Image (cartoon, rainbow, N blue to C red):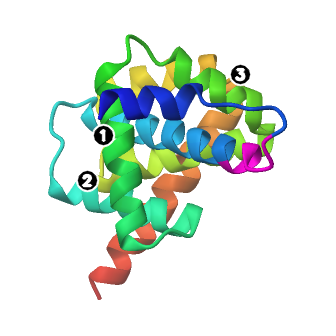
Amino acid sequence: MIDAIKHFFTEKTPSDPKDQINTDRRVAIAVCALLLEMAHADDQFNKEEEENILSILKQKHHLSDKDAHKLLELAELEREESLDLWQFTNLINQNYSKFEKRGVIETLWQVIYADGKADTHEEYLMHKLIYLLNIPHEEMIAAKLQARERGDRHVSDDNP
């Protein structure tokens, strides 16, 4: 399985018409790996966090349940095998616009606030990721406030 993932990340034929699809898949795995890394940052990864990430993947990438689970599985294997986060952020930097990278940051905040709070490990990791993704601190704060507000709305929607 690990060899299949390595092949997936290294396969690239310039004349291949499926090249953009392969790149999109690799970037989706990279983004998912960052989401998983954030969910694991507080050492309390649970089923609710997994379901939250699956929901995000289905919404952001328009995936079926089966495809979202497969993406999560591939990203988890890649995350476990990686030595650092640079390989993921570099792929995102090469393929995403500033606007798209801001969306990644917003999604990461959604993962953080899924349990209603941000702990110091999650905050530290977020600062590391905005540096690696070349996102200004002000944009990180704006994304944080937006995610926290969205989380507050969902909490108040659940409690009449």
6 relative position to 144: left or right: left
Residue at which label 2 appears: 49
Residue stretch in magenta:
16-21
Closer to the chain start, of discs 3 and 2, is 2
Query: Which residue lies at the image location 78% right of the left edge and 42% below the top edge?
Result: 16
Residue type at numbered disc 2: Glu
Q: Quadrant of residue 135?
A: top right
17 in the magenta segment: yes
Query: Which residue lies at the image location 79% right of the left edge and 37% below the top edge?
Result: 98
Contact check, label 3 and label 2, Cβ < 8 Å? no
Mark 2: secondary structure = helix
Within 10 angstroms of label 3, few (less than 14), some, or many (20 or more) residues?
A: few
Tell me how many marks there are: 3
Camera-nearest residue between 106 and 151: 106
- The residue most toward the bottom is 160
Image spot of residue 136 (x, y percent): 72, 25
Residue at which label 3 appears: 134
Residue at which label 1 appears: 39
Mark 3: secondary structure = loop
Contact check, label 2 and label 1, Cβ < 8 Å? yes
Q: Determine the CA span between mark 2 and mark 1.
A: 7 Å
Mark 1: secondary structure = helix
Q: Quadrant of the N terminus?
A: top left
